[in-house]
Amino acid sequence: MSRLYYTENGNLVATLCEELTTFRRARKALHLPPTQAPATLYVLARRYPESELPLRVSVNGVQISPIPPRPSRRHDWYTATVDAALLREGDNLFEFWTDSTAMDSWSLAVERGHAQPRSFISDDGGVTWRNEAMAYLNVLRGEYVVRLRLAGGQDPPPPHMTWEDPASPRLASLRRLLPPEAFGDAPLMDRVRALASWLSCSWAHWNAADSRLYAPWDPETIIAWGQAEAGHAGQRPIDMCVHYSVALVSCCQAAGIAARCAALKGTLPSATDGHFVVEVWFPEHEKWVMVDPTFDAVLWRDGLPLSLVQIREAGSDLRDLIRWGPGLQCRLREPGKRGVVEKFTQGYCFGHRSLWPRADFLSHPRFSPSGHGAAAYCETGLVWERADLDSGYGMFPCFGDADYFDKPPRQERASGV
């Protein structure tokens, strides 16, 4: 048994985080219970590719072993073991800095939007501290994405799903855009595939390596920005697998079809083997079926569409199971996507799956992540499988069993507000 302690939700904007130097130091305060066992510290940080300097860390004024750099160009999870003797009941202070005098070594992830954050910045090497005018441009108040898992205690139960209100005017607006094949008495799979194919060919796939502006989880905006290849401040948006799936979930609900988002990982949260797909509830099969609108793919075996668990059990060669739609050709025409498609057929991303337990992106956009996929997975709202807690996913607080993932859509809607 263990419990994660944290003060943020992992909703960061990766282009506006905290730069560390020997003068500019960050501090995080976490309120902890007494403990007699070593703890695991999780830090979401970005190491500059050219820097070989470690990330310096102290716990309640005592330096621990520095965190060594590793090759990466984005904010990833780094871990450190903290001896129980360094921790105390009540407030504990974790400080971070580097040996560089310029902002060219390490960046610490920060989540904006906190009125009284328990995170602080110093410009004078730790002599004075403030919890405002933070991040490298000194323009926000926020919490650093630093978490600690203690032995003992228990994480909270995972939340119920939250769906769109069928009477929402935003759903009615979206409904006007959908292809006519999404409605009527056609088989459910035909309707879903019509939506997936339409979205897959609606805009070009641009990920965090191609752009810096992240499109919001708003399907009409995703489509508009994607087709124009321009959005906020005239920049080309990041409009990737996350956005195809978010748009499909909302479009399915607009057509009266239950659908939800699933974030996948092949190995660890910091690895670049992630993907984002949709699960659609098929009453005739009494299960959630994986639909991938990015590559326009559904997997089948013995005449039945497969769930995410069944796909994982199928192994590393999925070629004979995949039924592609016309969206595949849209991806293959884009530079660099052929290799990604080949990896998909090898099942690179199905090792771990999580559920995003909100599907009300239109009604309550403020609950949507601000940049999922632009950094290592970090949102506390993700619900992972119970076994993942002991396989490198301890920086997340929510885990569910098979019943949680397999149960049909709830008839009532959790308010979630």
Image (cartoon, helix red, strand yellow):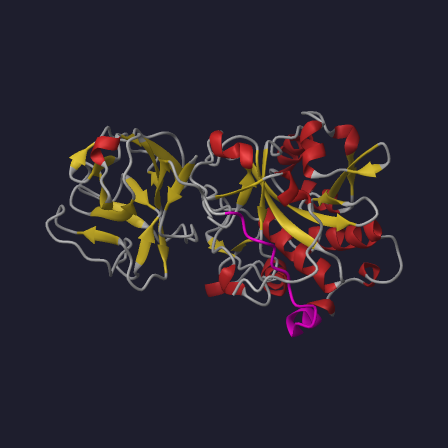
For residue 315, what is the image quadrant?
Answer: top right
| Quadrant showing the N terminus | top left
Describe residue 188's horizontal placement relative to residue 120 as left or right: right
The residue positioned 13% from the left and 46% from the top of the image is 125
- State the extent of the magenta-drawn residues as a range: 157-173
Describe residue 7's horizontal placement relative to residue 368 as left or right: left
Majority secondary structure of the magenta segment? loop
Q: Is residue 284 magenta?
A: no
Residue 137, percent across and down? 27, 57
Describe residue 144's horizontal placement relative to residue 366 as left or right: left
Give the farthest residue toward the left.
Answer: 127
Figure check: 117 above or below 124: below
Figure check: 57 above or below 284: above
Residue nearest the viewer, comparing 395 with 269:
395
Give the farthest residue toward the right.
Answer: 185
Describe residue 92's horizontal placement relative to residue 366 as left or right: left
The residue positioned 20% from the left and 38% from the top of the image is 100
Residue 311, percent across and down? 70, 33
Figure check: 201 above or below 44: below
Visible residue check, residue 156: yes
Residue nearest the viewer, comparing 118 with 76:
118
Residue 13, percent across and down? 41, 54
Residue nearest the viewer, comparing 108 with 253:
253
Q: Is residue 165 magenta?
A: yes
Residue nearest the viewer, comparing 161 with 185:
161
For residue 93, what is the image quadrant?
Answer: top left
The residue positioned 73% from the left and 51% from the top of the image is 196
Residue 221, percent across and down? 59, 64
